[in-house]
Amino acid sequence: MDTANFEQFLQERIKVNWKAGNFGGGMVTIQRSKRMITVTSEVPFSKRPAWPTR
């Protein structure tokens, strides 16, 4: 999986106010460089992940 696909996956799965894809007007940002993705949040993240863990 390359970083572009993983960034798209995160954009579809991160929820703000219980809505996926809703970044709350800039409260959550995703930045991608060649090999690294940074997710920054102005609001607390949920302790439960939005995707299944192994």
Image: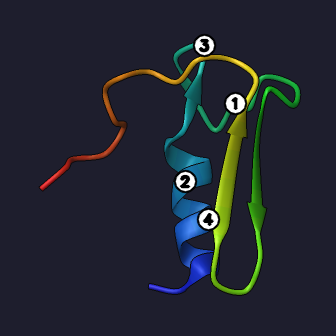
Residue at the image position 87 percent from the left and 31 percent from the top = 26
* Lower position in the chain sequence, tag 1 or tag 2: 2
Q: Residue at x 58, y 17 (%)?
A: 44
Q: Is residue 20 above or below residue 38?
A: above
Task: Identify which amino acid the numbered label 1 is placed on.
Answer: Asn
> Label 1, on which residue?
22
Q: Which residue is mark 4?
A: 7
**In this rendering, is residue 23 above or below 19?**
below
- Give x and y (percent) for residue 13: 49, 44
Q: What amino acid is found at the position of numbered circle 4 in the picture?
A: Glu
Q: In which quarter of the view is residue 34 placed?
A: bottom right
Left or right, 26 with reference to 9: right
Which marked residue is nearer to the observer: mark 1 or mark 2?
2
Quadrant, the C terminus: bottom left
Q: Earlier in the sequence, mark 4 or mark 3?
A: 4
Q: Which residue is mark 3?
A: 17
Which label sits in the foreground, 4 or 1?
4
- Amino acid type assigned to the residue bearing label 2 in the image: Leu
For the residues marked 4 and 2, what is the alpha-carbon distance in whole angstroms?
5 Å
Residue under the point 80% across and 26% down: 27
Q: Position of residue 31 (x, y in %)?
A: 78, 60
The residue singled out by tag 2 in the image is 10
| Mark 3 / mark 2, whichever is N-terminal | 2
Q: CA distance from mark 3 to mark 1?
A: 8 Å
Q: Helix, strand or loop at disc 1?
A: loop
Q: Is there a contact, CB below 8 Å, between mark 4 and mark 2?
A: yes
Identify the residue at image location x=87%, y=25%. Answer: 25
Residue 9, percent from left and from top: 51, 60
